[in-house]
Amino acid sequence: MSTRPPRLREKAQVLDETALDRALTRIAHEILERNGGAKDLTFVGLRTRGVTLAQRLTAKIAAIDGTTLPVGTLDITLYRDDLDMRGAPVIRGTDIPFSIKNKTVILIDDVLFTGRTIRAALDALIDLGRPKMIQLAILVDRGHRELPIRPDYIGKNLPTSKRESVAVRLREHDGEDRVVIEEPEEA
Amino acid sequence: MGWTRKDLVTMRELEPAEIVLLVDTAASLQEIAGREIKKVPALRGKTIVNLFYENSTRTRTSFEIAGKWLSADVINFSAGGSSAAKGESFIDTAKNIAAMSPDVVVVRHSSAGAASILARELTCSVVNAGDGAHEHPTQALLDLLTIREHKGHFEGLSVAIVGDIAHSRVARSNIHAMRKLGMTVTVAGPPTLIPPFVQEMGVKVSYRLEDAIRDVDVVMMLRLQQERMTGGLIPSLREYSRYWGLTLDKLRAHARPDVLIMHPGPVNRGVELSPEVADGPYSVILDQVTKGVAVRMAVLFLLAGSKAGGAA
């Protein structure tokens, strides 16, 4: 089994509830602007918080444009490149109840770090069909990329050091809307 | 709860949470069967050897499909047409195969304990695909997944297992697992086919089909192992079928309208199950087979897909 992670303490708040909501509203507008409306758009969120963010984005688009867009859930466990380095992973399943063939897929995750999760997500998506285009929306881009991956929509650019971590807390899971930087306690 | 075992040999040794983890993982993997491209890269570069010393259709095929859908390389070995036919012992054959560095060996053997011997002797993961009349854990897991999909939960459900309990590894694995998950189990069959002291496994015993199937959520019919006929354990096939064969009339008269009828296969049509029941609305027999692939994917993934499950 993996060793116990060090205790983290909060170092700084990056986004509060209002700022988080504004960032999502802006991203919703940017998605519509870039794609000339909501036609042929589908949303796929990465478990767990990417799915919640996808639902919030589609609600905003519905409010702006009147279009209801489908949201799918992607679990990338089976596509990870670090299965050999981790403890037994838990698979919670992919649930994309619509075809992504010839659609524009907006892929959503909360934090973009090394890019390895997105690499796995791209492989997983393309195994489900050939989308016309995949665009990446991220709430917080914290840098330190290890792969040539770049988001199309960014809520907040946040330079971090590698030992810090970024926690996105959402009402649906954590009871509050907030993004904070954390660092190991015994540093 | 994570998976930490090297092998899957018995249901008896598993914790309830481990059983639930296996069933949950299998449930999540089911969607792969509905995809256009039925392949995920999780076990790329892993090697799985199917070491089968007994005939099998469902189990071997579904282990093979499961391994291939996870992108592992799957090699089938069957005792006929191999060096086993030249007199090589089971352990020697297994050690020779292990020397080729597989990640998982799936073993079926007619002797109880064969899988646990391999688990002890080999450094790779070992999966028991049926050892004599002992255990058949992946069958119990697919039965559990089927039950949960139809009934929504385990706790408090009642199950009747009917037929040749004494020779059934399926019954044994299911009894262990179901008792751990809070289900009530009744075993039923002619006295010659009920093992002595079976009550010590925490089950009720019934000697009448009509009583056993009354008010239960699930009826699991076992195959009458006709090769046992010579042992004089039952007077005749006709008599067995008359008293222990499940017909639509008996079901309608005694069982609940929402009962599930299960069978691990292969079915002796007209012996333990009438064709109208086997193909009827209560039957989930083919559903069990479909779920078998997902369950075996879950087992292979948990054993070979992570550091925790892999060889030490």
Image (cartoon, coloured by chain):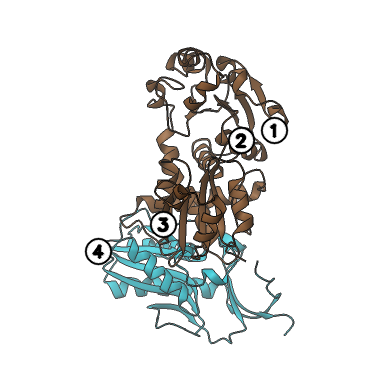
Q: Amino acid at mark 3?
A: Ile
Query: Where is mark 3, residue-wise?
Result: B75
Label 1: how many Cα within 10 Å (few below 14, some 14–19, many 20+): few
Q: A82 or B241: nearer the eye?
A: B241
**Marks 1/4: CA–CA distance:** 56 Å
Q: Do the CB atoms of the residues marked 2 and 1 lie less than 8 Å apart? A: yes
Q: Which chain is brown?
A: B
Q: B118 or B18: nearer the eye?
A: B118
Give the quarter of the figure containing the N terminus of chain B: bottom right
| Marks 4 and 2 on same chain | no
Q: Secondary structure at mark 4?
A: loop
* B109 displayed left or right of B4: left
Q: Quadrant of residue B36?
A: bottom left
Identify the residue at the far front of this view.
Answer: B86
| Marks 3 and 2 on same chain | yes
Query: Where is mark 4, residue-wise?
Result: A102
**Marks 3/4: CA–CA distance:** 38 Å
* In the image, residue B168 above or below residue A105: above
Query: Where is mark 2, residue-wise?
Result: B172
Q: B3 or B6: nearer the eye?
A: B6
Q: Position of residue A41 (x, y in %)?
A: 31, 64
Q: Secondary structure at mark 1?
A: helix
Q: Amino acid at mark 4?
A: Asn
Q: Residue A64: in sight, yes or no?
A: no
